[in-house]
Amino acid sequence: MIQQEKVVPTTTGHTWDDDLQELNNPLPTWWIWGFYVTFIFTILYWLFFPAWPIGGSFTKGVPGWNDVTYTATTVDGKQVQKTTHWNMRSKFMQDMNERGAEQKVWFDKVAAMSYEDVSADADLMQFVNSAGKTLFSDNCAPCHQAGGQGKIGFAPNLTDDYWQYGGTYELIHTTIAGGRRGYMPPFKEVLTEAQIKQLANYVLSLSDEPHDAEAAKVGDTLFHSETAACFYCHGAEGNGRIELGSANLTDKIWLWVNVADEKKPELKLSAVEKVITGGLNHGVMQPWEHRLQPEQIKLLTVYVHDSLGGGK
């Protein structure tokens, strides 16, 4: 029988508790060379690329060969070409310019065509849906929510067929470009509590919500009288007026109070009374004509009209 030679491991010579020793195993050769390569790479990177901070500046690396050129916007809105040393910000700007140049071809097509022609072009609508979703997410979603469904008491729902200021391409464009400022005066100093309750019952009756029929009959008279004069803004039939952005009170769509989801009739009545009493002064949408390019507003118009709400 052949006896195998016993291999005695090399130790560092340190011993604890009589028999506890520290082995001295060498690192693998591939690991050593890998360390050397990364060390050399680090030195070269420090020399060729921006790296070390020096006071208020930093080393710029080898000038010229790693410069990046991109388009920047000055304070007065002018587009200028800038060339700078390589860094992640300048590289990002360069990439954005390249993507922007590719998109500009499509934006120019949108700008040159009518709304109807854009809507009828299947290839162009793919771009509208893609770019429009991004523009909407970046600029509109904070108020109208990611899918355009809006939020009662805060921003209109853009996915239904009701448009407070009109749903044609032209009117949607006007809304986005110029913004909107809705307002309803408070009636607490004009009407008594009893009259406000009667008006609220009449408003509920227009949407077939539970109401007091006798009070609604009196509220009908108030609605069409010079005392409350609600018909001036909401129309004689309560259908609202697009030019004023006044609510249609007959369509069961509630923007500023969630009447539809209130379970108890008294809570529905109280919600409407609150609006009549205090009025509304928060239906404000900022104008975007100074924040977005005209072609972006036009594309957003088509996106909102065709892809979200099927505007009328």
Image: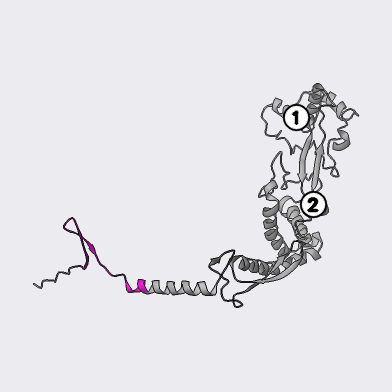
Badge 2 marks a residue whose secondary structure is: helix
Measured as percent of width and height from the top left, residue 269 is found at 74, 27
Q: Which residues are magenta?
A: 9-32
Magenta region includes residue 11? yes
Indicate left or right for 49 with 11 as reference: right
Visible residue check, residue 214: no
Residue for badge 2: 172
- In space, the residues marked 1 and 2 are separated at their CA atoms by 30 Å
Indicate left or right for 198 with 64 as reference: right
* Residue 201 or residue 275, whichever sits in front: 275
* Residue 53 or residue 277, whichever sits in front: 53
Residue for badge 1: 274
Residue located farthest toward the front when viewing the structure as drawn: 55
Number of labels in the image equals 2
Quarter of the figure with residue 232: top right
Visible residue check, residue 19: yes
Q: Using a 10 Å C-alpha cutoff, classify the residue at mark 2 as few (fewer than 14 neighbours), some (14 to 19) or many (20 or more).
A: many
Sequence order check, earlier mark of 1 and 2: 2
Indicate left or right for 266 with 32 as reference: right
Measured as percent of width and height from the top left, residue 3 is found at 11, 71
Kind of residue at disc 2: Ile
Quarter of the figure with residue 150: top right
Measured as percent of width and height from the top left, residue 112 is found at 81, 65
Badge 1 marks a residue whose secondary structure is: helix
